[in-house]
Image (cartoon, helix red, strand yellow):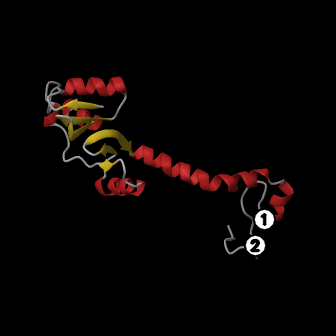
Amino acid sequence: MAVPTLTQLGEVARRTDEYEVGCVLVTDGGSLCGVVTDRDLAVRVLTGSLDSGTRVDEVMSRPVITVDATDDIHVAYRAFRRSGVRRLPVLDGRRVVGVLAVDDMLMDVFQRIGDLLGPVAWSVLKAPRTSLRRSGLTERGRAGTRRSRTSPYSERV
C-alpha cells in the first residue's frame, strides 16, 4: 500500500489496520521516496513525540532499500542481511510492484528444506519396522550405536 507524502499519520495508522499490513510505502509523484512501518507509528506517535496530524514525510525512513523485480533471490537475501530491514519494496523500473518480507524468505527456506528432506522422510515412514531395526534405528526413531560400513555419512549418535 502506498500513500502520498502529505498523508497524516492518523490516516496511515488507520490504513495499516484496515489492510492488515506492517508498512506503508510513501510516494511523491508516483516515485517511491520512503517507508513507514507499524513500529515507526507505535514508537513515535504513542511516545508522544508526534501526533496523528503529523505528515508521513516527517517520519518516513529514507533512503529506501529496494530490489528489482528481475533480481535473483540471492540479491534479496543479501539486501536483508546487510540492511537489517524486514521488508523490501520490489521495483519494476521506478514502479513499485510488491513488497518482499523476511517472512517470505523464511517460507522459501522452509519450502526448500521440505523439498530436500521430504523424499527422505517419506522413505523412512514407509519402511517396515524390521528394516528400521536392521538399519540401527530404535523404535523411538533414534539411531543406535552401530555404525554402517557402507556410508561415510553414518555417525554414532
Instruction: Assess disc 2: are there few (<14), some (14-19) or many (≥20) residues with their C-alpha within 10 Å of its C-alpha.
Output: few
Tell which residue pokes out farthest to the right in this image. Answer: 130
Identity of the residue drawn at 68% across and 75% down: 152
Observer-nearest of 137 and 13: 13
Q: Position of residue 44 (x, y in %)?
A: 19, 35
Q: Left or right of 84: which side holds 128?
A: right
- Does the CB distance between marks 2 and 1 fall below 8 Å? yes
Tell me which label, 2 or 1, sits earlier in the chain: 1
The residue at 15%/35% (across/down) is 57
Amino acid type shown at disc 1: Gly
Q: How many marks?
A: 2
Camera-side residue: 38 or 87?
A: 87
Q: Secondary structure at mark 1?
A: loop
Name the element at disc 2: loop
Q: CA distance from mark 2 to mark 1?
A: 8 Å
Residue 15 image position (x, y, % from top left): 29, 25
Residue drawn at (27%, 40%) of the image: 95
Q: Report whether 90 appears left or right of 12.
A: right
The one of 43 and 66 positioned closer to us in this rendering:
66
x%, y% of residue 9?
19, 28
Q: Position of residue 3 (x, y in %)?
A: 23, 30
Disc 2 designates what residue? 148
Residue 133 against residue 87 in the figure, above or below? below
Quarter of the figure with residue 100: top left
24 to the left or right of 106 = left
Which residue type carries mark 2?
A: Ser
| Up-down relation of residue 66 to residue 26 (above or below) | below
Q: Quadrant of the C terminus?
A: bottom right
Q: Which residue is label 1 attached to?
A: 136
Name the foreground residue: 29 vs 45. Answer: 29
Residue drawn at point x = 72 percent, y = 63 percent: 143
